[in-house]
Image (cartoon, rainbow, N blue to C red):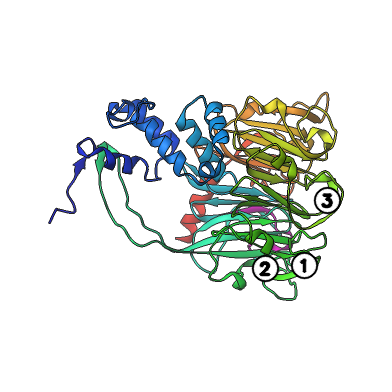
Amino acid sequence: MADRNQIFYIQELPFHLIMEVLTSGRLSAADLATLEITCHMFGAKHELCPDKFRSVAEYAAYCLCHAHQVFDSMSLSARIGLLSRCGGNWKKVLRFLHSIEQSSGIVETSAGKMQVVTGKYHTLLIHNSSLYSCGSNLCGVLGHGHHMTQCATFSRVNFPSLSPVVHVSASHNHAAFVTQSGEVSNPCFCLFTFELFVLVNKTPFCNFQVFTCGDNSSYCCGHGDIGRTVFRPTRIEALRGIPCKQVATGLSFTVILTRQGHVYTCGNNTHGQLGHGDSIERLTPAIIQLLAENSKVVQVAAGPSYTFAVTVDGSVYSFGSYTNFCLGHGDQSDKFVPSAIQSFKRRDIHVVCVSAGDEHALAIDSSGYVYSWGRGYCGALGHGNQNDKPSPELVTALKGQIAVQVCARKRKTFVLTDEGSVFAFGWMGFGSLGFSDRSISDKVLKPRALDSLCGHSVSQISTGLYHTVAVTNKGIVFGFGDNERAQLGHEWLRGCLQPTEIMVQRMVEAVTAQSS
Protein backbone atom coordinates (compact mmCIF):
# COMPACT_ATOMS: atom_id res chain seq x y z
CA MET A 1 0.00 0.00 0.00
CA ALA A 2 1.25 3.49 -0.89
CA ASP A 3 2.45 5.73 1.91
CA ARG A 4 -0.42 8.16 2.67
CA ASN A 5 2.05 10.72 3.98
CA GLN A 6 4.27 10.69 0.89
CA ILE A 7 5.06 14.14 -0.45
CA PHE A 8 4.93 14.85 -4.19
CA TYR A 9 6.27 17.94 -5.90
CA ILE A 10 3.42 19.32 -7.90
CA GLN A 11 5.34 19.42 -11.16
CA GLU A 12 5.76 15.65 -10.87
CA LEU A 13 2.02 15.08 -10.89
CA PRO A 14 -0.04 14.16 -13.96
CA PHE A 15 -1.73 17.15 -15.62
CA HIS A 16 -5.23 16.08 -14.55
CA LEU A 17 -4.16 16.12 -10.88
CA ILE A 18 -2.60 19.56 -11.26
CA MET A 19 -5.92 20.76 -12.65
CA GLU A 20 -7.73 19.14 -9.70
CA VAL A 21 -5.60 21.26 -7.37
CA LEU A 22 -6.13 24.48 -9.33
CA THR A 23 -9.88 23.94 -9.68
CA SER A 24 -10.52 22.67 -6.15
CA GLY A 25 -12.46 25.83 -5.40
CA ARG A 26 -9.97 27.11 -2.84
CA LEU A 27 -8.12 29.43 -5.20
CA SER A 28 -9.39 32.87 -6.17
CA ALA A 29 -8.81 34.69 -9.43
CA ALA A 30 -6.07 36.67 -7.67
CA ASP A 31 -4.41 33.43 -6.55
CA LEU A 32 -4.39 32.13 -10.12
CA ALA A 33 -2.96 35.42 -11.37
CA THR A 34 -0.20 35.24 -8.74
CA LEU A 35 0.68 31.69 -9.73
CA GLU A 36 0.70 32.70 -13.38
CA ILE A 37 3.26 35.48 -12.92
CA THR A 38 5.46 33.82 -10.28
CA CYS A 39 5.78 30.26 -11.54
CA HIS A 40 6.70 29.24 -15.07
CA MET A 41 4.75 26.02 -14.75
CA PHE A 42 1.43 27.82 -14.25
CA GLY A 43 2.23 30.77 -16.50
CA ALA A 44 3.27 28.72 -19.49
CA LYS A 45 1.14 26.85 -21.98
CA HIS A 46 0.88 23.10 -21.33
CA GLU A 47 0.73 20.58 -24.13
CA LEU A 48 -2.53 19.18 -22.72
CA CYS A 49 -4.21 22.62 -22.53
CA PRO A 50 -6.57 23.49 -25.38
CA ASP A 51 -4.84 25.76 -27.90
CA LYS A 52 -6.90 28.85 -27.08
CA PHE A 53 -5.46 29.14 -23.54
CA ARG A 54 -2.10 30.82 -23.12
CA SER A 55 -1.40 29.34 -19.68
CA VAL A 56 -2.39 26.59 -17.24
CA ALA A 57 -3.73 29.24 -14.83
CA GLU A 58 -5.96 30.74 -17.54
CA TYR A 59 -7.31 27.27 -18.39
CA ALA A 60 -8.03 26.66 -14.69
CA ALA A 61 -9.94 29.97 -14.52
CA TYR A 62 -11.97 28.90 -17.57
CA CYS A 63 -12.86 25.59 -15.89
CA LEU A 64 -13.83 27.33 -12.64
CA CYS A 65 -16.06 29.78 -14.51
CA HIS A 66 -17.92 27.01 -16.28
CA ALA A 67 -18.46 25.23 -12.96
CA HIS A 68 -19.86 28.39 -11.32
CA GLN A 69 -23.62 28.45 -10.81
CA VAL A 70 -24.08 31.99 -12.13
CA PHE A 71 -22.07 31.37 -15.29
CA ASP A 72 -23.69 27.99 -15.87
CA SER A 73 -27.15 29.60 -15.84
CA MET A 74 -26.22 32.30 -18.36
CA SER A 75 -27.11 32.08 -22.05
CA LEU A 76 -24.34 31.72 -24.62
CA SER A 77 -24.72 35.36 -25.69
CA ALA A 78 -24.53 36.51 -22.05
CA ARG A 79 -21.35 34.47 -21.52
CA ILE A 80 -19.76 35.93 -24.63
CA GLY A 81 -20.79 39.42 -23.53
CA LEU A 82 -19.20 39.00 -20.10
CA LEU A 83 -15.98 37.59 -21.52
CA SER A 84 -15.80 40.52 -23.93
CA ARG A 85 -16.35 43.01 -21.08
CA CYS A 86 -13.45 41.35 -19.25
CA GLY A 87 -11.13 41.73 -22.24
CA GLY A 88 -11.11 38.01 -23.00
CA ASN A 89 -9.46 37.31 -19.63
CA TRP A 90 -11.01 34.31 -17.85
CA LYS A 91 -9.40 35.28 -14.55
CA LYS A 92 -11.30 38.59 -14.68
CA VAL A 93 -14.51 36.70 -15.45
CA LEU A 94 -13.86 34.48 -12.43
CA ARG A 95 -13.21 37.54 -10.25
CA PHE A 96 -16.54 39.01 -11.36
CA LEU A 97 -18.41 35.78 -10.55
CA HIS A 98 -16.80 35.44 -7.12
CA SER A 99 -17.45 39.11 -6.32
CA ILE A 100 -21.12 38.82 -7.28
CA GLU A 101 -21.40 35.72 -5.12
CA GLN A 102 -19.99 37.58 -2.12
CA SER A 103 -21.76 40.90 -2.74
CA SER A 104 -24.62 40.18 -0.34
CA GLY A 105 -22.72 38.03 2.14
CA ILE A 106 -19.30 37.12 3.50
CA VAL A 107 -16.24 38.50 1.69
CA GLU A 108 -12.74 37.05 1.87
CA THR A 109 -10.09 39.52 3.08
CA SER A 110 -6.49 39.07 4.15
CA ALA A 111 -7.69 39.64 7.73
CA GLY A 112 -10.29 36.88 7.47
CA LYS A 113 -13.89 36.48 6.41
CA MET A 114 -16.02 39.58 6.96
CA GLN A 115 -19.46 41.05 6.31
CA VAL A 116 -20.73 44.50 7.25
CA VAL A 117 -24.35 45.67 7.38
CA THR A 118 -25.70 49.04 8.44
CA GLY A 119 -29.12 49.97 9.73
CA LYS A 120 -30.90 53.08 10.88
CA TYR A 121 -28.46 54.01 13.64
CA HIS A 122 -26.42 50.84 14.01
CA THR A 123 -23.76 48.67 12.37
CA LEU A 124 -23.19 44.93 12.58
CA LEU A 125 -19.98 43.22 11.50
CA ILE A 126 -19.02 39.59 11.05
CA HIS A 127 -15.31 39.00 11.57
CA ASN A 128 -13.99 35.46 11.33
CA SER A 129 -17.36 33.91 12.21
CA SER A 130 -17.97 36.12 15.26
CA LEU A 131 -20.54 38.93 15.27
CA TYR A 132 -19.88 42.46 16.57
CA SER A 133 -22.27 45.41 16.77
CA CYS A 134 -22.27 49.08 17.72
CA GLY A 135 -24.56 52.11 17.72
CA SER A 136 -28.09 52.51 19.01
CA ASN A 137 -29.65 49.45 20.64
CA LEU A 138 -33.18 50.65 19.84
CA CYS A 139 -35.55 47.69 20.20
CA GLY A 140 -32.65 45.39 21.02
CA VAL A 141 -31.33 45.28 17.44
CA LEU A 142 -27.69 45.01 18.60
CA GLY A 143 -28.36 41.74 20.39
CA HIS A 144 -26.65 42.76 23.65
CA GLY A 145 -29.67 42.52 25.93
CA HIS A 146 -32.18 44.96 27.40
CA HIS A 147 -29.73 46.72 29.74
CA MET A 148 -27.80 48.46 26.96
CA THR A 149 -29.20 51.50 25.13
CA GLN A 150 -26.11 52.32 23.06
CA CYS A 151 -22.80 50.64 22.30
CA ALA A 152 -19.96 53.08 21.56
CA THR A 153 -17.51 50.57 20.09
CA PHE A 154 -17.88 47.23 18.34
CA SER A 155 -18.75 44.63 20.97
CA ARG A 156 -19.13 40.90 20.48
CA VAL A 157 -22.67 39.48 20.33
CA ASN A 158 -23.14 36.25 22.25
CA PHE A 159 -25.18 33.40 20.77
CA PRO A 160 -26.71 30.45 22.65
CA SER A 161 -24.23 28.19 20.85
CA LEU A 162 -20.69 28.79 19.63
CA SER A 163 -21.69 28.21 16.01
CA PRO A 164 -20.02 30.49 13.43
CA VAL A 165 -22.13 33.36 12.09
CA VAL A 166 -22.13 33.26 8.27
CA HIS A 167 -24.70 35.91 7.29
CA VAL A 168 -26.44 38.92 8.84
CA SER A 169 -29.08 41.51 7.92
CA ALA A 170 -30.24 44.43 10.05
CA SER A 171 -31.57 47.20 7.84
CA HIS A 172 -34.25 48.52 10.20
CA ASN A 173 -35.27 47.74 13.80
CA HIS A 174 -34.57 44.02 13.98
CA ALA A 175 -31.73 41.75 12.93
CA ALA A 176 -31.49 38.25 11.47
CA PHE A 177 -28.49 35.93 11.38
CA VAL A 178 -27.53 32.63 9.77
CA THR A 179 -25.24 30.39 11.81
CA GLN A 180 -23.42 27.24 10.80
CA SER A 181 -23.12 24.14 12.96
CA GLY A 182 -21.59 20.76 12.19
CA GLU A 183 -18.37 19.98 10.38
CA VAL A 184 -17.45 20.43 6.76
CA SER A 185 -14.12 18.93 5.72
CA ASN A 186 -12.90 18.45 2.17
CA PRO A 187 -9.57 17.45 0.68
CA CYS A 188 -7.08 20.16 1.61
CA PHE A 189 -4.39 21.21 -0.85
CA CYS A 190 -1.28 23.15 0.10
CA LEU A 191 0.64 24.89 -2.67
CA PHE A 192 3.46 26.26 -0.55
CA THR A 193 6.77 25.24 -2.17
CA PHE A 194 4.53 23.55 -4.73
CA GLU A 195 4.01 20.46 -2.60
CA LEU A 196 0.71 18.63 -2.36
CA PHE A 197 -0.65 17.26 0.88
CA VAL A 198 -3.86 15.26 0.86
CA LEU A 199 -5.19 15.51 4.39
CA VAL A 200 -8.71 14.42 5.23
CA ASN A 201 -11.87 13.65 3.33
CA LYS A 202 -14.86 13.60 5.65
CA THR A 203 -18.46 13.49 4.55
CA PRO A 204 -19.74 17.09 4.65
CA PHE A 205 -22.41 17.72 7.23
CA CYS A 206 -23.70 21.11 8.12
CA ASN A 207 -26.75 22.75 9.62
CA PHE A 208 -27.46 26.41 8.86
CA GLN A 209 -29.86 27.93 11.38
CA VAL A 210 -31.55 31.34 11.61
CA PHE A 211 -31.54 33.55 14.71
CA THR A 212 -33.31 36.89 15.17
CA CYS A 213 -33.46 39.72 17.68
CA GLY A 214 -34.91 43.22 17.98
CA ASP A 215 -38.34 44.70 17.39
CA ASN A 216 -40.97 41.99 17.10
CA SER A 217 -44.15 44.05 17.07
CA SER A 218 -45.37 42.43 13.84
CA TYR A 219 -43.94 38.98 14.60
CA CYS A 220 -41.06 39.65 12.24
CA CYS A 221 -38.65 37.73 14.46
CA GLY A 222 -40.54 34.58 13.52
CA HIS A 223 -40.96 32.99 16.94
CA GLY A 224 -44.75 32.82 16.91
CA ASP A 225 -45.10 34.63 20.23
CA ILE A 226 -47.13 37.69 21.15
CA GLY A 227 -44.70 40.10 19.58
CA ARG A 228 -42.53 41.02 22.55
CA THR A 229 -39.11 42.58 21.83
CA VAL A 230 -36.36 39.96 21.47
CA PHE A 231 -33.24 41.36 23.13
CA ARG A 232 -30.81 38.53 22.35
CA PRO A 233 -30.35 36.30 19.29
CA THR A 234 -32.95 33.54 19.47
CA ARG A 235 -33.26 30.61 17.08
CA ILE A 236 -36.35 30.35 14.86
CA GLU A 237 -37.61 26.89 15.78
CA ALA A 238 -39.98 26.76 12.80
CA LEU A 239 -36.91 26.56 10.52
CA ARG A 240 -35.16 23.79 12.45
CA GLY A 241 -33.83 21.23 10.00
CA ILE A 242 -34.10 23.62 7.01
CA PRO A 243 -30.59 24.70 5.92
CA CYS A 244 -30.68 28.46 5.31
CA LYS A 245 -28.33 30.63 3.27
CA GLN A 246 -29.35 34.28 3.42
CA VAL A 247 -31.62 36.61 5.38
CA ALA A 248 -33.04 40.03 4.52
CA THR A 249 -34.83 42.32 6.97
CA GLY A 250 -37.45 44.83 5.89
CA LEU A 251 -39.46 47.16 8.09
CA SER A 252 -41.12 44.65 10.47
CA PHE A 253 -40.81 41.63 8.17
CA THR A 254 -38.13 39.05 7.43
CA VAL A 255 -37.16 37.14 4.29
CA ILE A 256 -35.19 33.89 4.50
CA LEU A 257 -33.52 32.09 1.58
CA THR A 258 -32.75 28.40 2.01
CA ARG A 259 -29.84 26.54 0.47
CA GLN A 260 -32.33 24.72 -1.74
CA GLY A 261 -33.40 28.06 -3.23
CA HIS A 262 -36.76 28.35 -1.44
CA VAL A 263 -37.97 31.57 0.19
CA TYR A 264 -39.71 31.87 3.57
CA THR A 265 -41.22 35.06 4.99
CA CYS A 266 -42.80 36.26 8.23
CA GLY A 267 -43.99 39.45 9.91
CA ASN A 268 -45.88 42.48 8.62
CA ASN A 269 -47.78 41.85 5.37
CA THR A 270 -49.85 45.01 4.88
CA HIS A 271 -48.81 45.42 1.25
CA GLY A 272 -48.28 41.77 0.34
CA GLN A 273 -44.53 41.96 0.91
CA LEU A 274 -44.53 38.38 2.24
CA GLY A 275 -45.61 37.09 -1.17
CA HIS A 276 -48.43 34.76 -0.10
CA GLY A 277 -51.25 36.36 -2.08
CA ASP A 278 -52.88 38.11 0.89
CA SER A 279 -52.21 40.77 3.53
CA ILE A 280 -52.26 38.49 6.59
CA GLU A 281 -49.30 38.62 9.00
CA ARG A 282 -47.27 35.43 9.43
CA LEU A 283 -46.17 34.66 13.01
CA THR A 284 -43.59 32.14 11.83
CA PRO A 285 -41.79 31.77 8.48
CA ALA A 286 -43.95 30.34 5.69
CA ILE A 287 -42.69 29.21 2.28
CA ILE A 288 -43.67 31.24 -0.79
CA GLN A 289 -45.26 28.55 -2.92
CA LEU A 290 -45.19 30.44 -6.21
CA LEU A 291 -41.42 30.86 -6.04
CA ALA A 292 -40.94 27.25 -4.94
CA GLU A 293 -42.72 26.11 -8.09
CA ASN A 294 -40.51 28.23 -10.38
CA SER A 295 -36.74 28.61 -10.74
CA LYS A 296 -34.36 28.32 -7.82
CA VAL A 297 -33.90 31.64 -5.98
CA VAL A 298 -30.26 32.74 -5.50
CA GLN A 299 -30.67 36.11 -3.74
CA VAL A 300 -33.30 38.01 -1.77
CA ALA A 301 -33.50 41.67 -0.79
CA ALA A 302 -35.99 43.59 1.35
CA GLY A 303 -36.97 47.26 1.22
CA PRO A 304 -39.16 48.96 3.84
CA SER A 305 -42.34 47.26 2.51
CA TYR A 306 -41.36 45.34 -0.59
CA THR A 307 -39.27 42.30 -1.53
CA PHE A 308 -37.04 41.11 -4.38
CA ALA A 309 -36.14 37.55 -5.30
CA VAL A 310 -33.50 36.88 -7.98
CA THR A 311 -33.72 33.45 -9.60
CA VAL A 312 -30.95 31.34 -11.09
CA ASP A 313 -32.18 32.07 -14.61
CA GLY A 314 -31.63 35.82 -14.10
CA SER A 315 -35.24 36.87 -13.48
CA VAL A 316 -36.19 39.38 -10.78
CA TYR A 317 -39.47 38.90 -8.91
CA SER A 318 -40.85 41.77 -6.87
CA PHE A 319 -43.83 42.01 -4.53
CA GLY A 320 -45.23 44.31 -1.87
CA SER A 321 -45.80 48.06 -1.91
CA TYR A 322 -45.72 49.92 -5.21
CA THR A 323 -44.83 53.18 -3.39
CA ASN A 324 -41.95 55.06 -5.05
CA PHE A 325 -42.10 52.70 -8.08
CA CYS A 326 -39.69 50.36 -6.31
CA LEU A 327 -41.35 47.21 -7.68
CA GLY A 328 -40.14 48.13 -11.16
CA HIS A 329 -43.34 47.16 -13.01
CA GLY A 330 -44.16 50.69 -14.18
CA ASP A 331 -47.58 50.78 -12.53
CA GLN A 332 -48.96 51.90 -9.17
CA SER A 333 -50.47 48.82 -7.60
CA ASP A 334 -49.31 46.57 -4.78
CA LYS A 335 -48.28 43.03 -5.74
CA PHE A 336 -49.41 40.34 -3.32
CA VAL A 337 -47.65 37.53 -5.17
CA PRO A 338 -44.16 37.51 -6.77
CA SER A 339 -44.25 39.05 -10.24
CA ALA A 340 -41.33 39.02 -12.69
CA ILE A 341 -40.10 42.46 -13.77
CA GLN A 342 -40.94 42.33 -17.46
CA SER A 343 -38.60 45.17 -18.42
CA PHE A 344 -35.65 42.83 -17.82
CA LYS A 345 -37.30 39.89 -19.56
CA ARG A 346 -38.22 41.85 -22.69
CA ARG A 347 -34.61 42.96 -23.13
CA ASP A 348 -33.22 39.51 -22.30
CA ILE A 349 -31.27 40.97 -19.37
CA HIS A 350 -29.88 38.36 -16.97
CA VAL A 351 -29.82 39.95 -13.49
CA VAL A 352 -27.32 38.60 -10.96
CA CYS A 353 -28.00 40.77 -7.90
CA VAL A 354 -30.27 43.55 -6.61
CA SER A 355 -30.43 46.12 -3.83
CA ALA A 356 -33.68 47.36 -2.27
CA GLY A 357 -33.48 50.94 -1.01
CA ASP A 358 -35.94 53.10 0.90
CA GLU A 359 -37.23 54.89 -2.21
CA HIS A 360 -35.34 53.34 -5.13
CA ALA A 361 -33.73 50.10 -6.24
CA LEU A 362 -30.77 48.89 -8.29
CA ALA A 363 -29.64 45.78 -10.13
CA ILE A 364 -26.52 44.40 -11.81
CA ASP A 365 -26.73 42.23 -14.91
CA SER A 366 -24.47 39.38 -16.01
CA SER A 367 -22.11 41.79 -17.79
CA GLY A 368 -21.70 44.10 -14.80
CA TYR A 369 -24.01 46.86 -16.05
CA VAL A 370 -26.08 48.79 -13.48
CA TYR A 371 -29.81 49.56 -13.67
CA SER A 372 -31.85 51.81 -11.38
CA TRP A 373 -35.50 52.66 -10.84
CA GLY A 374 -37.81 54.36 -8.33
CA ARG A 375 -37.70 57.91 -7.01
CA GLY A 376 -34.95 60.14 -8.37
CA TYR A 377 -34.64 62.32 -5.26
CA CYS A 378 -31.23 64.03 -5.05
CA GLY A 379 -29.95 62.09 -8.06
CA ALA A 380 -30.03 58.73 -6.30
CA LEU A 381 -30.74 56.94 -9.62
CA GLY A 382 -27.53 58.24 -11.20
CA HIS A 383 -29.05 59.55 -14.42
CA GLY A 384 -27.90 63.16 -14.04
CA ASN A 385 -31.28 64.49 -12.92
CA GLN A 386 -33.90 63.95 -10.21
CA ASN A 387 -36.52 62.32 -12.43
CA ASP A 388 -38.39 59.23 -11.29
CA LYS A 389 -38.05 55.95 -13.21
CA PRO A 390 -41.05 53.58 -12.93
CA SER A 391 -39.05 50.71 -14.46
CA PRO A 392 -35.36 49.78 -14.66
CA GLU A 393 -33.08 51.94 -16.80
CA LEU A 394 -29.39 51.51 -17.55
CA VAL A 395 -27.08 53.89 -15.69
CA THR A 396 -25.12 55.02 -18.74
CA ALA A 397 -22.49 56.91 -16.75
CA LEU A 398 -21.27 53.55 -15.40
CA LYS A 399 -21.10 51.70 -18.73
CA GLY A 400 -17.31 51.79 -18.58
CA GLN A 401 -17.26 50.01 -15.22
CA ILE A 402 -17.90 46.37 -14.30
CA ALA A 403 -20.07 46.55 -11.19
CA VAL A 404 -20.05 43.75 -8.60
CA GLN A 405 -22.14 45.30 -5.80
CA VAL A 406 -24.88 47.94 -5.57
CA CYS A 407 -26.12 49.44 -2.33
CA ALA A 408 -29.21 51.65 -2.15
CA ARG A 409 -30.59 53.40 0.90
CA LYS A 410 -32.23 56.71 1.79
CA ARG A 411 -31.75 58.88 -1.35
CA LYS A 412 -28.21 57.66 -1.97
CA THR A 413 -26.44 54.90 -3.85
CA PHE A 414 -23.05 53.19 -3.87
CA VAL A 415 -21.65 51.05 -6.66
CA LEU A 416 -18.59 48.82 -6.16
CA THR A 417 -16.56 47.76 -9.21
CA ASP A 418 -14.51 44.63 -9.89
CA GLU A 419 -11.35 46.73 -9.47
CA GLY A 420 -12.33 47.66 -5.90
CA SER A 421 -13.32 51.24 -6.73
CA VAL A 422 -16.40 52.92 -5.24
CA PHE A 423 -18.80 55.27 -7.02
CA ALA A 424 -21.40 57.25 -5.08
CA PHE A 425 -24.35 59.49 -5.97
CA GLY A 426 -27.42 61.00 -4.34
CA TRP A 427 -27.81 62.98 -1.14
CA MET A 428 -24.63 64.10 0.66
CA GLY A 429 -26.36 64.71 4.00
CA PHE A 430 -24.25 64.09 7.14
CA GLY A 431 -21.29 63.19 4.92
CA SER A 432 -22.66 59.71 4.29
CA LEU A 433 -21.56 59.81 0.61
CA GLY A 434 -17.96 60.33 1.66
CA PHE A 435 -17.44 63.65 -0.16
CA SER A 436 -16.32 66.57 1.97
CA ASP A 437 -17.05 69.34 -0.60
CA ARG A 438 -20.59 70.67 -0.16
CA SER A 439 -20.02 74.29 -1.19
CA ILE A 440 -22.21 74.19 -4.29
CA SER A 441 -24.81 71.49 -3.67
CA ASP A 442 -25.64 68.66 -1.30
CA LYS A 443 -26.62 66.46 -4.26
CA VAL A 444 -24.50 64.32 -6.58
CA LEU A 445 -26.62 63.67 -9.68
CA LYS A 446 -24.19 61.38 -11.51
CA PRO A 447 -21.90 58.57 -10.32
CA ARG A 448 -18.73 60.06 -8.88
CA ALA A 449 -15.63 58.13 -7.83
CA LEU A 450 -14.96 58.17 -4.10
CA ASP A 451 -11.36 59.36 -4.43
CA SER A 452 -10.74 59.29 -0.69
CA LEU A 453 -10.73 55.47 -0.95
CA CYS A 454 -8.76 55.27 -4.21
CA GLY A 455 -5.69 53.87 -2.44
CA HIS A 456 -7.68 50.89 -1.23
CA SER A 457 -9.40 47.99 -2.93
CA VAL A 458 -12.88 47.88 -1.41
CA SER A 459 -14.51 44.45 -1.11
CA GLN A 460 -17.87 45.42 0.39
CA ILE A 461 -19.86 48.53 1.27
CA SER A 462 -23.06 49.11 3.24
CA THR A 463 -24.96 52.33 3.86
CA GLY A 464 -27.47 53.05 6.60
CA LEU A 465 -29.81 55.96 7.06
CA TYR A 466 -27.05 58.57 7.52
CA HIS A 467 -23.81 56.58 7.72
CA THR A 468 -21.74 54.25 5.55
CA VAL A 469 -19.17 51.52 6.26
CA ALA A 470 -16.75 49.89 3.81
CA VAL A 471 -14.43 46.87 4.10
CA THR A 472 -11.25 46.58 2.01
CA ASN A 473 -9.57 43.46 0.68
CA LYS A 474 -7.05 43.78 3.52
CA GLY A 475 -9.81 43.73 6.13
CA ILE A 476 -9.52 47.44 6.96
CA VAL A 477 -12.88 48.98 7.89
CA PHE A 478 -13.71 52.60 7.04
CA GLY A 479 -16.73 54.57 8.20
CA PHE A 480 -18.15 57.96 7.28
CA GLY A 481 -21.27 60.01 7.88
CA ASP A 482 -23.29 60.50 11.05
CA ASN A 483 -21.91 59.07 14.30
CA GLU A 484 -24.20 60.73 16.83
CA ARG A 485 -25.24 57.33 18.19
CA ALA A 486 -21.79 55.74 17.77
CA GLN A 487 -22.94 53.76 14.73
CA LEU A 488 -19.47 54.14 13.21
CA GLY A 489 -17.80 52.57 16.22
CA HIS A 490 -16.01 55.81 17.19
CA GLU A 491 -16.71 56.81 20.75
CA TRP A 492 -15.83 60.50 20.56
CA LEU A 493 -16.59 61.65 16.99
CA ARG A 494 -19.97 63.21 16.10
CA GLY A 495 -19.46 62.42 12.43
CA CYS A 496 -16.94 61.91 9.62
CA LEU A 497 -17.17 63.76 6.31
CA GLN A 498 -14.58 61.46 4.75
CA PRO A 499 -13.78 57.75 5.22
CA THR A 500 -12.10 57.26 8.59
CA GLU A 501 -10.59 53.96 9.70
CA ILE A 502 -12.40 52.05 12.41
CA MET A 503 -9.89 50.09 14.49
CA VAL A 504 -11.87 46.87 14.30
CA GLN A 505 -8.88 44.53 14.59
CA ARG A 506 -7.77 46.19 17.82
CA MET A 507 -11.30 45.93 19.23
CA VAL A 508 -11.55 42.25 18.22
CA GLU A 509 -8.21 41.48 19.90
CA ALA A 510 -9.34 43.27 23.05
CA VAL A 511 -12.62 41.33 23.17
CA THR A 512 -10.76 38.05 22.58
CA ALA A 513 -8.31 38.83 25.36
CA GLN A 514 -11.14 39.63 27.79
CA SER A 515 -13.03 36.43 26.95
CA SER A 516 -9.93 34.29 27.43
Residue 1: tell me if it is visible.
yes
Give percent across and percent down for residue 32. Answer: 39, 34
- Secondary structure beneath dot 3 equals loop
Which label lies toward us, 1 or 3? 3
Q: Amino acid at mark 3?
A: Tyr
Most distant residue in the left direction: 1
Q: Position of residue 191 (x, y in %)?
A: 30, 40
Q: Which residue is mark 1?
A: 218
* Magenta span of residues: 132-144
Q: Residue at x 62, y 35 (%)?
A: 416
Query: What residue does disc 2 label?
Result: 286
Label 3 close to label 2 by CB (< 8 Å): no
Outermost residue toward the right in this view: 332
Residue 7 lies in the magenta-colored region: no
The residues tagged by marks 3 and 2 sit, at their Cα atoms, a distance apart of: 22 Å
Residue under label 3:
322
Quadrant placement of the N terminus? bottom left
